[in-house]
Every structure is written in C-alpha cells, then in structure tokens.
Amino acid sequence: MTMQARVARIHEYGDPGVIRIETDALPDPGLGEVVLQQGAAAIHFADSYMREGRYFLKPPLPTVLGLEGVGTIAAVGEGVKDYKEGDRAAYLFNMGAYADARIVPEEQLYVPPADLDDQTVVATFVRAMTAQYLLRRLYPVQAGETILVHSAAGGMGSLLSQWATSLGAKVIGTVSSPDKFLAAEENGCAHVIDYTKEDFAGAVLDITDGAGVPVVYDAVGEAAYEGNLRALAPRGWFVNYGHASGPPPIDALELNQKSLIFTKASMKDYVAAPAEKAMMMQEVVSAISEGTVKPNITGTYELADIAKAHEALDSRMTTGALVAVFES
Ligand SMILES: NC(=O)c1ccc[n+]([C@@H]2O[C@H](COP(=O)([O-])OP(=O)(O)OC[C@H]3O[C@@H](n4cnc5c(N)ncnc54)[C@H](OP(=O)(O)O)[C@@H]3O)[C@@H](O)[C@H]2O)c1
C-alpha cells in the first residue's frame, strides 16, 4: 500500500505565510534508502533563512523545509545494511524534515541514545554538534578565558554558554529582553548584556579592563559586526556561524586594524570526514549524559502550526529550542 506523508512545503520564498501543509504519496524507498515515520523534527533558525531564500543553500522550489528529524523505520529499500523495519533512527542535515514520514538515505542515519526522547534528540543534536566544533575545534576555548557569545538565551547560544562555562571559560552573553537575560544567566553566563539597553562592545571592554575578548561566537551578523570588531582583542577570532540580521559586511582593512581572524563557519565542513563526525557524535552524547549541555525545549508545534513557530523565531520571541511533533 502506498504510504502518505503530510509535509510543510514552500512554493515561493517569503514570510511564514508561504508555508503550506500538503499531502504527498511516498514512493517506495530506493536503493540504500529507508522510509522514516517521524516522531519529531527540529525547528532551526536556519529553516527561517531557507524560507526566505537567504541561506547559503538555496533549494529549488517547491521544497519541504526542515533539516533534522528522528523516528521509526517503516520500510527499507534494497541494499540497506544496518537498519531494519522498526528500528529507531535520526539524521542531522537533510532538507525535507517537516514531514510526518519521509525517505532518508541509510548513510545519513544514526542511532540516537535510547534514553533520549524524540523531541530531545532534535532539539539538541545539530546544535550540540555545532557547539562542539565551534568551542573545541575551530577555536579551542581555554579555562580562564573570557569570551563573548551572542544570543545567549537562544537554542545555539544556550548550548554554547553552557558548554564554554563547563570548560572553565567566563562567558559574556548578549540578549534582547529581561526574560532572555534570566535565561542566559541560567545558561551559566558570568556576565549578561542586554544590547537593547547598552552598547555591548563598550560593556565587553569594561568587563575585560579594555583588553577585549579572544573570541566572539556570533550568529547575528550585520547588526553586531561593528561591535564585534570593537569587542575583540588583537589577534582575536571573529567566529560567525549565522546571520540573523544579514551577513557581516566584512572589510579586510578593518580586520587588519587588530590582525583579527574571521571565519564564516558551517557544520557541513566539520562533519564531512566520517571519523571526525563519529568523534563529535561521541563527545556530544557524553556532553548530554554528563549534563554539560542541557536540552531545553520551550515550544512544541504540530505540523499545521509550523508557521506560528517561524513567526515566533523571526520576531525573537523564543528562548531555547522549538520542535515539530508528529502524531504516530
Ligand atoms: N554554522 C553552523 O554550523 C550552524 C549550525 C546550527 C545553527 N547555526 C545558526 O545558529 C543560529 C541560531 O540558531 P537557533 O536555531 O538556535 O536560533 P536561536 O538562536 O534560538 O534564535 C535566533 C536568535 O538570534 C537573535 N537575533 C539577533 N538578531 C536577530 C534578527 N534580526 N532576527 C531574528 N533573531 C535575531 C535573537 O536573540 P536575541 O533576541 O537575544 O538577540 C534570536 O532569538 C542561526 O543563525 C543558525 O543558522 C549555524
């Protein structure tokens, strides 16, 4: 019998109103593919970039949004070696996750820890893998360093603040509201700056006695660009991993003023080698089980309400992570 899937799809780029809920007939899984009956999918800010057509990956339209999901295998195609019908499986980065069922290549699957429920898996894995490469590999944060993390109450910022604090760093977190201020404190930030009330770069220089920070983790982009240049110490690392307000308007001569090192980082380039990916995954599983990072789901949305989740994200109403849930 042909399976059906309910999906959240866009036919044009735009505001959350472009998201449509549709029903598809699922083809049989092909060579090396499985059909995953999904329990949950992540709702990332990157999905909002995709919806607006301002992500570095611009998928051809129409497209089903969403990147990360988890569920139970409902059917396997020929040549699938390590999974069978009824197994639980998840994937990290495959367009089309806003769907109650979908096809996924076996090579993209991993087995999530049995003690984590579906919502926790998708709220945590991509973000924690990202925190792992940002804090442990791209710029290895050292105990005793004072570092700057923007959006410290958000999904990514929460995990970065928690993990960096557990490494012994003092985290200065920025936020945009009193509620987020409290959330950033709970995430371990030693100092929290509400950038709607004070100049964050000036506050960072005050906190560091004028020295500046050796690294900034920034997914704000354009709006924080000039402040980041001021807040960084000479030879500091300007790590940009997102661009909520637009891409940072990089100027080599401005970087030259303090010999700053700029990177616009993407997880795909840090998980491409299977051995590196396995190492990251292992570290993330340990970080979750040891409580180094604490999954924090602040909103769950049924497929029909995905546009509401996007509205909340776009209007900066959210802390922690949002998740899409599907009825089995
Ligand atoms: N490069 C990678 O490998 C990688 C991997 C995963 C995620 N990411 C990036 O990580 C970032 C955070 O993702 P997330 O899903 O966890 O989202 P999130 O941080 O929970 O939400 C985004 C936050 O950005 C801040 N923000 C600043 N300017 C904004 C603007 N103009 N519009 C909307 N928000 C603005 C808001 O916090 P305040 O109100 O406190 O300012 C908002 O809550 C995204 O940019 C995503 O693309 C990158």
Image (cartoon, rainbow, N blue to C red):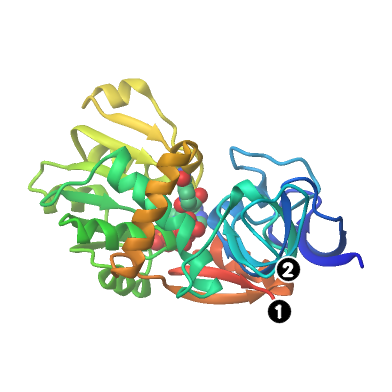
User: Could you tell me which residue is drawn at 24 percent across and 47 percent down?
Assistant: 201
User: Could you tell me which residue is drawn at 55 percent across and 72 percent down?
Assistant: 118
Depth check, front residue: 69 or 27: 27
Q: Position of residue 250 (x, y in %)?
A: 41, 29
Q: Is residue 309 above or below residue 14?
A: below
In the image, what residue type sits under mark 1?
Glu
- Quadrant location, the N terminus: bottom right
Q: Which residue position holds label 2?
A: 100
Q: Is residue 187 above or below residue 282?
A: below
Spot the residue most to the left: 209
Q: Are marks 1 and 2 in contact (CB under 8 Å)?
A: yes
Observer able to see residue 201: yes
Q: Could you say which disc has been placed on residue 54 in the image?
A: none
Depth check, front residue: 107 or 37: 107
Label 1 to label 2, Cα distance in Å? 8 Å
The 10 Å Cα crowd at callout 2, few under 14, some 14 to 19, many 20 or more, is: many
Q: Secondary structure at mark 2?
A: loop
Question: Which quarter of the figure has residue 158?
Answer: bottom left
Q: Position of residue 5 (x, y in %)?
A: 81, 66
- Quadrant location, the C terminus: bottom right
Question: Which quarter of the figure has residue 238?
Answer: top left
In the image, what residue type sits under mark 2?
Asp
Q: Position of residue 290 (x, y in %)?
A: 28, 68
Describe residue 163's horizontal placement relative to residue 131 as left or right.
Answer: left
Q: Which residue position holds label 1?
A: 327
